[in-house]
Amino acid sequence: MIRFIYLVIVSSFLLASNIFSQTLTGQLTLNPYPSPYVSDWENNPAALGSLTFIKGEGPGYQIRIRAIVSMQGKGEVFRSITNPVQLTSAVVQIINNTQLIGLSDATFTNSAYEKKMRITGRMLEGNYTACLTIENMNGVIM
């Protein structure tokens, strides 16, 4: 009987570790000629691009995507985190820019940049670098 209980406990841990250690990969696809207008990114699914998630089979779960955006010559200009994104049980799921971008939730680290962007409604001309991280709902990077 003790061996059976031990086997059930070990099996439960193995099952739980399989559920929580699913592999998740993402592929970012960007429009080669994106709109410079922030409102387009928030409303038009084709204005900027999409993120394709490929995960192992299993139940769905929620994630958040954290972004840090820097501009060449100005450094970091803003950072943002999405609302929870529900990944379904599907192995492949595509999320477009309207589900990812919400500059109303952005925290600007460069106030001069923020002021110009809010006045013009568009990203300033220049070269940008964006660093995206995928996190579970506890903030652990996946």
Image (cartoon, rainbow, N blue to C red):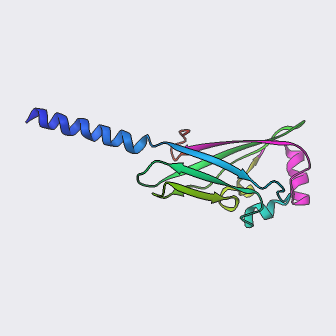
Residue 119, image quadrant: bottom right
- Judge whether residue 112 is colored magenta: yes
Eyeballing the image, is 23 above or below 43? above
Total of numbered circles in the picture? Answer: 0
Q: Position of residue 49 (x, y in %)?
A: 72, 56
Look at the image and tell me in which quarter the C terminus lies: top right
Q: Is residue 7 above or below residue 66?
A: above
| Residue sitting at the far bottom | 43
Residue under the point 74% across and 57% down = 104
Say whether residue 119 is left or right of residue 132.
Answer: right
Question: In the figure, residue 66 lies in which quadrant?
Answer: top right
Could you tell me which residue is drawn at 61 percent across and 55 percent down? 83
Q: What residue is at 64 percent from the left and 47 percent from the top?
A: 27
Q: Quadrant of the N terminus?
A: top left
- Residue placed most toward the observer, 50 or 133: 50
Is-magenta flag for residue 11? no
Question: Taking 6 as reference, is 136 left or right?
Answer: right
Q: Is residue 47 left or right of residue 5?
A: right
Q: Residue at x 84, y 60 (%)?
A: 35
Q: Which residue is at the front of the view, 77 or 130?
A: 130
Magenta residue span: 108-135
